[in-house]
Image (cartoon, coloured by chain):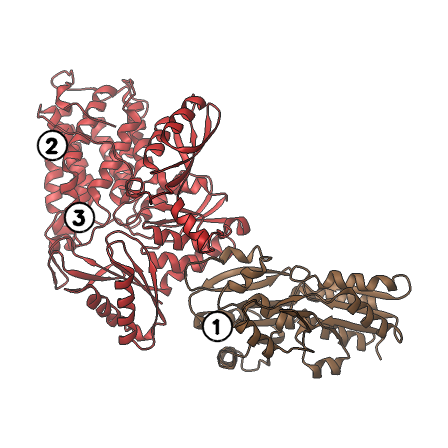
Chain colours: A red, B brown
Amino acid sequence: MSATAPVSAQVIERERPWRQCNGQQLKVLLQASLAWLDANHEAINDLNVFPVPDGDSGTNMLLTLQSAWNEIAQSPSKNVGEIMSGVAKGALMGARGNSGVILSQFLRGMANVLTDKETFNAAELARSFQEGTRLAYQGVQKPVEGTILTVARESAEAAAHAAAASEDIHYVLTATVTEAQRSVARTPDLFPLLKKAGVVDAGGQGLFIILQGALKFLNGEKIESEVAHRRSAYIENLQAEEGWGFDIQCIIRGQTMDVNAVRSRVESMGESVLVVGDYNLIKVHAHAPSPGAILDYCVSQGVVSKVIVENMEEQYQEILLGQAKPPIAAESISGIATVVVASGAGLQRVFESLGASQIVTGGATMNPSVQDLAQAIESVDAQNVIVLPNDKNIILAAQQACRLTKKAVRIVPSVTIPQGIASLLAYNFQADLDTNADSMTRALKNVETGEITRAVRSVSIDGLDVREGQAIGLLDGKLTVAGDDLHTVAIDILRQINADHYEIVTIYFGEDTTQSAADDLAAQIRATFANLQTEVISGGQPHTHYILSME
Amino acid sequence: MPRVQIVTDSTADLPPAVVEQFGIHVVPLTVHMGKEVLRDGIDIDTEQFLKKLKAAKTPPTTAAPPPKAFEDTYAKILREHDDILSIHISSKLSQTVTMAERGALPFLGRKRIAVVDSLSASRGLGYLAIAAAEAARDGAALDELVKLIRSLIPHVYLVFFVETPEYLNRGGRFVKAQAMLGTLMNIKPLLAIEDGEIVPLEKVRTRQRAIEKLCEFTLEFARVRHMTILHADNDAEVKELSDKILEQLPEAHIETAAYGPVLASHVGPDAVGIVIFEEST
């Protein structure tokens, strides 16, 4: 998507009062919403309760809405039902994080009401908001008030009231947005954690911004934004080691692709190029100093799947070290594949070495979309799949991804990396899908997770005053310790759980720290807790300096 | 003297007293150490082998007995008897069954030798050999014995964990087991012999938990005829495991055995396992 032109350069030709909205008019409103969300998404990200980077709601909602827009950006349809069903589909595929998934559910509910309609009127708009709210609540197992759900519900009620009084869509939208803003302001009263952190709910604010964007446009206010083409952080972060570069493989599916054109373009970007296929399926294999350009190009040609990007320097080193033999994929034995979400090259390798069939890049700071997860589930060579989300903000997206596939999928609700690893260890090659899902879920309790990082903002929660930049320790996701030194905080976390009763602490050190620092920490731990074994593994995860697994 | 004589191989890990008590004939596998070729259990025992395994630069390897070893054993028995049941280590772990079949060829048509693949190893094989010897002593005929043993094979279970997958890797033969190999972490894979093959079960991080898993596995059986803890010179963990089992099953009779050189060369010197021979009725 590129909403490059200032949205206000366009106008909606409309009657006053505005009684009927058609597909193209809805499209322009949506574009305005997207542009306004883009302009505000970082501010929404900052409405974070915890002083750790996690599941940025603004980014997640923006990427979700952008995916919705992409689905209809080229559509000339004036039929509001068609546009809205495209929006719902695009939103679902692109949904990231809990707030993104809830937004996609809201849009799906709207689409259900507007299905087959050429235009909508004020009453239908209000009804679509209500149905959107209903589906949003339905998509969450334990709805919590003081969140985007409350904002959706109260705004929809205001819309219904307004629609009872007036046939003017502009009037109804104005009433909706006014209530959305008030509702957002009330979220801290409903959700104590927000109040303590002194913020309003980020997802609710996101929904308000989306509605407000459309209204601002109707009011003739200027909304300027340039939504840049966003590449996945994964690709941007990959930097070639000198000399070897990357081995890149993928499959492109399309309708009218030109194999020769694809080949000559890929040849211009890489070496050892192998491009084979036909108009609807092309397999690409190339070596290049960096994978981004080739993958971007492939994505522009069709639907890309089975992406394999390997650092050849690493492969070379592994061959030198005699570790090149890949483990045999577990699914070929058991018929059950595992799809795991993790970020950090080291953590991904750990999961691979434990037999994970497919790794989806993502984690606290970059939630994978429903589509990313669905594609991973589809791409594995098994009809039975177990998903390990490894983050509380990815579980909902994983649940949505399940609905997009005919495969039998079980989600083991792991919320930390150590839980994911403990769970994968319990994977039994001889057991069936449900038995495995059960025992893997039970295994989540086998570990305690400590996360040691630095606070990204100053905050006061649960009697703990944290300054920005201070070392903090989370125990099973809960902020527990703050201090000046990362290692001291790590030891404190271990004290909190009586680490002497555990056998082994595994330290996964992140990209912001070093092996030698991690080795020092391990030595400190052994000196403090005589009975503990330690193991140090390069995790390479962003932001979290140390992930500690106690078992 | 029973009409049918029972032959097995040294991987059955049967103690000499049991061999003598049941009149079982044992053909040794061979251990290759540098240029030396040693007979399992005769020229080298488990303890010596484990020392060599840990110390040797080029690790020792094992090989099935040559056909001639079987032919000689069979010939000696057949001077006084007509029938032999020859039961051996899983054909998926060793060539022994094939070698026994070749060794039996010269007697074809004159005497009856049934070579049976136990689909097991170590005491799992041992228990089957003993069951065969008991039935033979009670007068069972060869075809009855073959039927009996085939029916007992599914009741023999062998589960173990290894300290490191390194030794399984060396063999390169255990394709399925390799699904858990090459791991970056310090993992103790839990493995089982199933249908004669070493298959992965799950993975644990510490020996402590591996012992707990073996105990859990044992407690799943309602009726156990025999059980043996397999180890290599690891009395502390053997005691821990047997204490854990006895806590839940105070009546249990738990045997222990050092696993022999052949299994040791596959699983390494620090494995612990358990063999369960379940009541079949």
Describe residue B183's horizontal placement relative to residue A342 as left or right: right
Instruction: Tell which subunit mark 2 falls on.
Output: A
Q: Please, is residue B245 above or below residue B150 in the view?
A: below
The image position of residue A390, as x and y in percent, is: 33, 53
Q: Picture quarter containing residue A241? A: top left
Q: Please, is residue A150 above or below residue A276 in the view?
A: below
Q: Does residue B13 appear in this view?
A: yes
Q: Could you say which disc has been placed on residue B211 in the image?
A: 1
The residue pinned by badge 3 equals A146
The amino acid on which the numbered mark 3 sits, given as a three-letter code, is Gly
What is the spatial separation of the Cα atoms under label 2 and label 1, in whole angstroms? 66 Å
Q: Does residue A165 appear in this view?
A: no
Q: Picture quarter containing residue A371? A: top left
The residue pinned by badge 2 equals A175
The image position of residue A512, as x and y in percent, is: 24, 55
Instruction: Tell which subunit mark 3 falls on.
Output: A
In this view, the mark in front (1 or 3): 1
Q: Residues within 10 Å of mark 3 (few under 14, many from 20)?
A: many
Q: Could you say which disc has been placed on residue A102 in the image?
A: none
Instruction: Find numbered disc 2 in the image and state the secondary structure of the residue it sits on.
Output: helix
Q: Quadrant of the C terminus of chain B?
A: bottom right
What is the spatial separation of the Cα atoms under label 1 and label 3, in whole angstroms? 48 Å
The image position of residue A307, as x and y in percent, is: 41, 38
Residue drawn at x 71%, y 81% is B18
Q: Nearer the viewer, residue A49 or A218?
A: A49
Tell me if label 2 and label 1 are in contact, CB under 8 Å: no
Which residue of the protein is positioned furthest toward the front in this rendering? B35
In this view, the mark in front (2 or 3): 3
What is the spatial separation of the Cα atoms under label 2 and label 3, in whole angstroms? 20 Å
